[in-house]
Amino acid sequence: MWFETTKVFSSTKLPNLSEGNHNVTIYYGYQEHYRNSPARYLVFAQSTEAFAVVNSNSTNVNTPNSDLNAYTKPEISINSPSGNITTNSTSFPLNFSVNFTRSSVSTALSIYYLLDGKDNTTLFNNGISYIDGSVFTFSNHTISNLSDGIHNVTIQAKAYYLYIGSGSEESTVQITVDTMSPAITDLSIENKTYSGSSIPLKFQTSENTPWIAYNLDNQGNTTIQGNVTLSKLTNGTHSIIIYAYDAAGNSGASQTTFFTVTPSQNPTPISGIGTVIAILAAVVVVGVGVLLFRRHRKASKSESETV
Protein backbone atom coordinates (compact mmCIF):
# COMPACT_ATOMS: atom_id res chain seq x y z
CA MET A 1 0.00 0.00 0.00
CA TRP A 2 1.29 3.39 -0.96
CA PHE A 3 0.81 6.52 1.11
CA GLU A 4 1.19 10.07 -0.05
CA THR A 5 0.73 13.49 1.55
CA THR A 6 -2.63 14.95 0.68
CA LYS A 7 -3.86 18.49 1.29
CA VAL A 8 -7.58 18.85 1.67
CA PHE A 9 -9.29 22.25 1.68
CA SER A 10 -12.93 22.74 2.32
CA SER A 11 -15.13 25.82 2.45
CA THR A 12 -18.61 25.53 3.87
CA LYS A 13 -21.19 27.64 5.61
CA LEU A 14 -22.60 26.50 8.93
CA PRO A 15 -26.39 26.73 8.73
CA ASN A 16 -29.03 27.91 11.23
CA LEU A 17 -26.69 28.98 14.01
CA SER A 18 -28.33 30.47 17.09
CA GLU A 19 -26.94 33.47 18.93
CA GLY A 20 -24.36 32.66 21.59
CA ASN A 21 -21.14 30.66 21.95
CA HIS A 22 -20.35 27.70 19.69
CA ASN A 23 -17.51 25.22 19.12
CA VAL A 24 -16.47 23.63 15.83
CA THR A 25 -14.02 20.70 15.59
CA ILE A 26 -12.01 19.79 12.43
CA TYR A 27 -10.76 16.20 12.18
CA TYR A 28 -7.89 14.88 9.97
CA GLY A 29 -7.60 11.21 9.14
CA TYR A 30 -8.86 8.54 6.76
CA GLN A 31 -11.36 5.77 6.49
CA GLU A 32 -10.49 2.10 5.93
CA HIS A 33 -12.69 -0.16 3.85
CA TYR A 34 -12.51 -3.95 3.90
CA ARG A 35 -14.62 -6.45 2.13
CA ASN A 36 -17.44 -7.75 4.23
CA SER A 37 -16.27 -5.49 7.14
CA PRO A 38 -17.62 -2.23 8.57
CA ALA A 39 -15.70 0.92 7.79
CA ARG A 40 -13.14 2.12 10.30
CA TYR A 41 -12.02 5.73 10.82
CA LEU A 42 -8.52 6.64 11.87
CA VAL A 43 -7.99 10.19 13.14
CA PHE A 44 -4.48 11.57 13.26
CA ALA A 45 -5.22 15.11 14.33
CA GLN A 46 -8.06 17.41 15.23
CA SER A 47 -8.57 21.08 16.06
CA THR A 48 -11.41 22.79 17.94
CA GLU A 49 -12.23 26.44 17.55
CA ALA A 50 -14.64 28.48 19.67
CA PHE A 51 -16.65 31.33 18.21
CA ALA A 52 -19.65 33.51 19.00
CA VAL A 53 -22.67 34.43 16.91
CA VAL A 54 -24.37 37.76 17.46
CA ASN A 55 -27.68 38.74 15.87
CA SER A 56 -27.05 36.68 12.76
CA ASN A 57 -29.03 34.46 10.43
CA SER A 58 -28.30 31.46 8.26
CA THR A 59 -27.63 33.61 5.20
CA ASN A 60 -25.29 36.07 6.86
CA VAL A 61 -23.05 34.13 9.22
CA ASN A 62 -19.72 35.52 8.02
CA THR A 63 -20.67 39.20 8.55
CA PRO A 64 -22.94 39.28 11.59
CA ASN A 65 -24.73 42.46 12.63
CA SER A 66 -23.58 43.29 16.14
CA ASP A 67 -26.13 43.76 18.92
CA LEU A 68 -23.76 44.23 21.85
CA ASN A 69 -26.30 45.68 24.28
CA ALA A 70 -28.28 42.44 24.16
CA TYR A 71 -25.30 40.10 24.11
CA THR A 72 -22.24 41.47 25.84
CA LYS A 73 -23.37 44.38 28.03
CA PRO A 74 -21.80 44.15 31.54
CA GLU A 75 -24.11 44.41 34.54
CA ILE A 76 -23.36 46.91 37.34
CA SER A 77 -24.74 46.59 40.88
CA ILE A 78 -24.02 49.48 43.30
CA ASN A 79 -24.23 48.54 46.98
CA SER A 80 -22.91 51.74 48.52
CA PRO A 81 -24.20 54.34 48.31
CA SER A 82 -27.56 52.60 47.99
CA GLY A 83 -29.42 54.97 45.70
CA ASN A 84 -29.54 58.76 45.78
CA ILE A 85 -28.66 59.98 49.28
CA THR A 86 -28.26 63.18 51.32
CA THR A 87 -25.42 63.16 53.82
CA ASN A 88 -23.47 65.50 56.09
CA SER A 89 -20.24 63.61 55.39
CA THR A 90 -17.72 64.83 52.82
CA SER A 91 -16.60 61.26 52.03
CA PHE A 92 -18.31 57.93 51.47
CA PRO A 93 -17.30 54.36 50.54
CA LEU A 94 -17.84 53.22 46.96
CA ASN A 95 -18.91 49.57 46.90
CA PHE A 96 -20.13 47.90 43.71
CA SER A 97 -19.76 44.83 41.52
CA VAL A 98 -19.62 44.18 37.78
CA ASN A 99 -20.91 40.95 36.24
CA PHE A 100 -19.18 40.26 32.94
CA THR A 101 -20.04 37.36 30.62
CA ARG A 102 -16.85 36.03 29.08
CA SER A 103 -16.84 34.55 25.58
CA SER A 104 -14.34 33.22 23.08
CA VAL A 105 -14.02 36.62 21.43
CA SER A 106 -13.54 38.62 24.65
CA THR A 107 -10.27 40.53 24.62
CA ALA A 108 -10.28 43.14 27.41
CA LEU A 109 -12.32 44.79 30.14
CA SER A 110 -12.07 48.25 31.73
CA ILE A 111 -13.94 49.57 34.78
CA TYR A 112 -13.81 53.15 36.02
CA TYR A 113 -15.89 55.89 37.63
CA LEU A 114 -16.42 59.60 36.97
CA LEU A 115 -17.19 62.28 39.55
CA ASP A 116 -19.50 64.99 38.22
CA GLY A 117 -18.77 63.93 34.65
CA LYS A 118 -14.99 64.35 34.92
CA ASP A 119 -11.95 63.10 36.84
CA ASN A 120 -12.01 59.65 35.26
CA THR A 121 -10.60 57.15 37.79
CA THR A 122 -9.68 53.71 36.42
CA LEU A 123 -10.30 50.81 38.79
CA PHE A 124 -9.59 47.93 36.40
CA ASN A 125 -8.12 47.77 32.91
CA ASN A 126 -6.61 44.56 31.60
CA GLY A 127 -6.65 41.97 28.86
CA ILE A 128 -9.19 39.18 29.14
CA SER A 129 -6.45 36.55 29.46
CA TYR A 130 -5.54 38.00 32.86
CA ILE A 131 -9.09 37.90 34.21
CA ASP A 132 -9.92 35.15 36.68
CA GLY A 133 -13.68 34.81 36.89
CA SER A 134 -16.49 37.00 35.62
CA VAL A 135 -17.69 38.92 38.71
CA PHE A 136 -15.58 41.87 39.86
CA THR A 137 -16.21 43.38 43.30
CA PHE A 138 -14.87 46.76 44.46
CA SER A 139 -15.28 47.49 48.17
CA ASN A 140 -12.15 49.30 49.28
CA HIS A 141 -12.44 52.62 47.44
CA THR A 142 -13.50 55.88 49.13
CA ILE A 143 -14.49 59.15 47.47
CA SER A 144 -13.51 62.03 49.74
CA ASN A 145 -13.14 65.82 49.99
CA LEU A 146 -16.58 66.51 48.53
CA SER A 147 -17.87 70.07 48.75
CA ASP A 148 -21.39 70.99 49.81
CA GLY A 149 -23.87 70.53 46.98
CA ILE A 150 -25.05 67.86 44.53
CA HIS A 151 -22.57 65.36 43.08
CA ASN A 152 -23.04 62.60 40.50
CA VAL A 153 -20.95 59.43 40.65
CA THR A 154 -21.06 57.39 37.43
CA ILE A 155 -19.61 53.87 37.20
CA GLN A 156 -18.80 52.61 33.72
CA ALA A 157 -17.77 49.15 32.52
CA LYS A 158 -16.61 48.51 28.96
CA ALA A 159 -15.85 45.15 27.37
CA TYR A 160 -13.94 44.66 24.10
CA TYR A 161 -14.47 41.85 21.60
CA LEU A 162 -12.78 40.60 18.46
CA TYR A 163 -14.49 41.54 15.22
CA ILE A 164 -17.65 42.97 16.81
CA GLY A 165 -16.35 45.98 18.75
CA SER A 166 -17.22 46.81 22.35
CA GLY A 167 -20.18 46.81 24.72
CA SER A 168 -20.55 49.14 27.71
CA GLU A 169 -22.84 49.89 30.61
CA GLU A 170 -23.00 52.68 33.19
CA SER A 171 -24.88 53.42 36.41
CA THR A 172 -25.14 56.75 38.25
CA VAL A 173 -25.99 57.69 41.84
CA GLN A 174 -26.52 61.22 43.17
CA ILE A 175 -24.91 62.38 46.41
CA THR A 176 -26.11 65.58 48.11
CA VAL A 177 -23.58 66.85 50.66
CA ASP A 178 -24.88 69.22 53.34
CA THR A 179 -22.65 70.09 56.29
CA MET A 180 -24.48 73.27 57.39
CA SER A 181 -26.71 73.22 60.48
CA PRO A 182 -30.21 74.70 60.08
CA ALA A 183 -30.62 78.19 61.59
CA ILE A 184 -33.73 79.04 63.64
CA THR A 185 -34.69 82.72 63.54
CA ASP A 186 -37.61 85.16 64.02
CA LEU A 187 -38.77 83.54 67.26
CA SER A 188 -42.06 85.18 68.26
CA ILE A 189 -41.58 84.67 72.02
CA GLU A 190 -39.27 87.33 73.50
CA ASN A 191 -37.65 88.10 76.83
CA LYS A 192 -40.63 89.93 78.28
CA THR A 193 -43.78 89.53 80.33
CA TYR A 194 -46.96 88.08 78.79
CA SER A 195 -50.46 88.35 80.17
CA GLY A 196 -52.48 85.16 80.04
CA SER A 197 -51.75 81.44 79.92
CA SER A 198 -51.59 81.05 76.08
CA ILE A 199 -48.81 82.43 73.84
CA PRO A 200 -48.34 81.87 70.05
CA LEU A 201 -45.01 80.23 69.14
CA LYS A 202 -43.78 81.20 65.66
CA PHE A 203 -40.32 80.89 64.06
CA GLN A 204 -38.42 80.44 60.76
CA THR A 205 -35.85 77.82 59.66
CA SER A 206 -33.14 78.43 57.06
CA GLU A 207 -33.87 75.16 55.21
CA ASN A 208 -36.27 72.25 55.06
CA THR A 209 -36.29 70.49 58.43
CA PRO A 210 -38.10 67.13 58.66
CA TRP A 211 -37.93 67.20 62.48
CA ILE A 212 -38.70 70.16 64.79
CA ALA A 213 -39.29 70.25 68.55
CA TYR A 214 -39.41 72.72 71.45
CA ASN A 215 -38.21 72.26 75.01
CA LEU A 216 -40.20 74.22 77.59
CA ASP A 217 -38.63 74.65 81.04
CA ASN A 218 -36.20 71.75 80.40
CA GLN A 219 -39.06 69.28 80.55
CA GLY A 220 -38.06 67.39 77.39
CA ASN A 221 -38.62 67.82 73.66
CA THR A 222 -42.11 68.13 72.22
CA THR A 223 -42.20 67.34 68.48
CA ILE A 224 -44.15 69.80 66.33
CA GLN A 225 -44.78 70.32 62.60
CA GLY A 226 -44.46 74.12 62.62
CA ASN A 227 -45.97 77.11 64.39
CA VAL A 228 -48.09 76.25 67.44
CA THR A 229 -49.66 77.92 70.52
CA LEU A 230 -48.29 77.28 74.00
CA SER A 231 -51.27 76.85 76.32
CA LYS A 232 -51.95 76.29 80.03
CA LEU A 233 -48.81 78.18 81.00
CA THR A 234 -48.49 78.73 84.73
CA ASN A 235 -47.74 82.14 86.22
CA GLY A 236 -44.06 82.83 86.67
CA THR A 237 -40.82 82.63 84.68
CA HIS A 238 -40.35 80.13 81.83
CA SER A 239 -37.63 79.18 79.30
CA ILE A 240 -37.92 77.77 75.78
CA ILE A 241 -35.51 76.39 73.09
CA ILE A 242 -36.36 75.30 69.51
CA TYR A 243 -34.48 72.35 67.97
CA ALA A 244 -34.43 71.15 64.33
CA TYR A 245 -32.74 68.46 62.17
CA ASP A 246 -32.33 68.73 58.40
CA ALA A 247 -32.43 65.89 55.85
CA ALA A 248 -28.65 65.37 56.11
CA GLY A 249 -28.79 64.89 59.88
CA ASN A 250 -27.39 68.30 60.88
CA SER A 251 -28.90 69.71 64.09
CA GLY A 252 -29.67 73.35 64.91
CA ALA A 253 -30.99 75.13 68.00
CA SER A 254 -32.29 78.58 68.83
CA GLN A 255 -31.08 80.76 71.68
CA THR A 256 -32.68 80.10 75.05
CA THR A 257 -35.48 82.60 75.61
CA PHE A 258 -36.73 83.49 79.10
CA PHE A 259 -40.19 85.00 79.53
CA THR A 260 -42.69 85.67 82.31
CA VAL A 261 -46.39 84.88 82.48
CA THR A 262 -48.83 86.89 84.64
CA PRO A 263 -52.60 86.51 85.14
CA SER A 264 -54.79 87.92 82.41
CA GLN A 265 -55.59 91.64 82.85
CA ASN A 266 -59.05 91.31 81.30
CA PRO A 267 -61.91 91.28 83.91
CA THR A 268 -63.66 88.00 84.33
CA PRO A 269 -67.36 88.15 83.32
CA ILE A 270 -69.85 87.62 86.19
CA SER A 271 -72.94 85.53 85.59
CA GLY A 272 -76.09 84.41 87.44
CA ILE A 273 -76.83 85.79 90.91
CA GLY A 274 -73.46 87.47 90.97
CA THR A 275 -74.50 89.60 88.01
CA VAL A 276 -77.66 90.80 89.85
CA ILE A 277 -75.67 91.66 92.96
CA ALA A 278 -73.11 93.55 90.91
CA ILE A 279 -75.83 95.57 89.16
CA LEU A 280 -77.56 96.41 92.45
CA ALA A 281 -74.29 97.48 93.96
CA ALA A 282 -73.60 99.73 91.00
CA VAL A 283 -77.08 101.29 91.30
CA VAL A 284 -76.54 101.97 94.99
CA VAL A 285 -73.19 103.59 94.35
CA VAL A 286 -74.65 105.78 91.62
CA GLY A 287 -77.62 106.73 93.84
CA VAL A 288 -75.43 107.71 96.74
CA GLY A 289 -73.29 109.76 94.43
CA VAL A 290 -76.29 111.66 93.04
CA LEU A 291 -77.64 112.33 96.55
CA LEU A 292 -74.36 113.72 97.80
CA PHE A 293 -74.07 115.90 94.69
CA ARG A 294 -77.52 117.39 95.25
CA ARG A 295 -76.81 118.11 98.92
CA HIS A 296 -73.56 119.78 98.04
CA ARG A 297 -75.28 121.91 95.39
CA LYS A 298 -78.10 122.94 97.78
CA ALA A 299 -75.66 123.96 100.49
CA SER A 300 -73.68 126.05 98.02
CA LYS A 301 -76.88 127.85 96.88
CA SER A 302 -77.89 128.68 100.47
CA GLU A 303 -74.53 130.21 101.21
CA SER A 304 -74.79 132.32 98.07
CA GLU A 305 -78.26 133.72 99.06
CA THR A 306 -77.06 134.54 102.57
CA VAL A 307 -74.29 136.66 101.26
Image (spheres, helix red, strand yellow):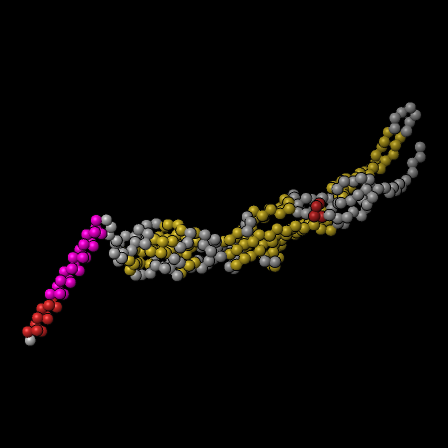
Whole-percent x, y for residue 79 in the image = 56, 47
Which residue sits at x=55%, y=51%? 84
Could you tell me what secondary structure mostly forms the magenta stretch?
A: helix
Is 114 left, or right, of 41 in this rendering? left
State the residue at coordinates (68%, 44%): 101
Quadrant of residue 193 within the rendered picture: bottom left
Q: Position of residue 304 (x, y in %)?
A: 9, 73
Can I make out residue 123 in this image? no
Q: Is residue 242 magenta?
A: no
Query: If the image is split into quadrants, where does the C terminus sit?
Result: bottom left
In the image, the segment drawn in magenta is 273-295
Q: Residue at x 34, y 59 (%)?
A: 189
Q: How many marks overall?
A: 0
Identify which residue, 214 or 18, lies in the foreground.
Answer: 214
Q: Residue placed farthest to the front in the image?
A: 305
Whether residue 67 appears in this view of the structure is yes
Q: Nearer the viewer, residue 249 or 81?
A: 249
Q: Residue furthest right?
A: 2
Give the x, y percent position of residue 285: 16, 59
Most extreme residue toward the bottom is 307
Q: Nearer the viewer, residue 146 or 216?
A: 216
Residue 2 horizontal side relative to residue 59, left or right: right
Q: Measuring from the top left, give residue 91's x and y in whole percent.
A: 51, 55
Q: Please tell me which residue lies in front, 257 or 252.
A: 257
Q: Is residue 142 left or right of residue 184?
A: right
Quadrant showing the N terminus = top right
Q: Tell me, yes or no, whether the highlighted magenta stretch contains residue 283.
A: yes
In the orientation shown, which residue stands out farthest toward the left? Answer: 306
What residue is at 30 percent from the left and 54 percent from the top? 197
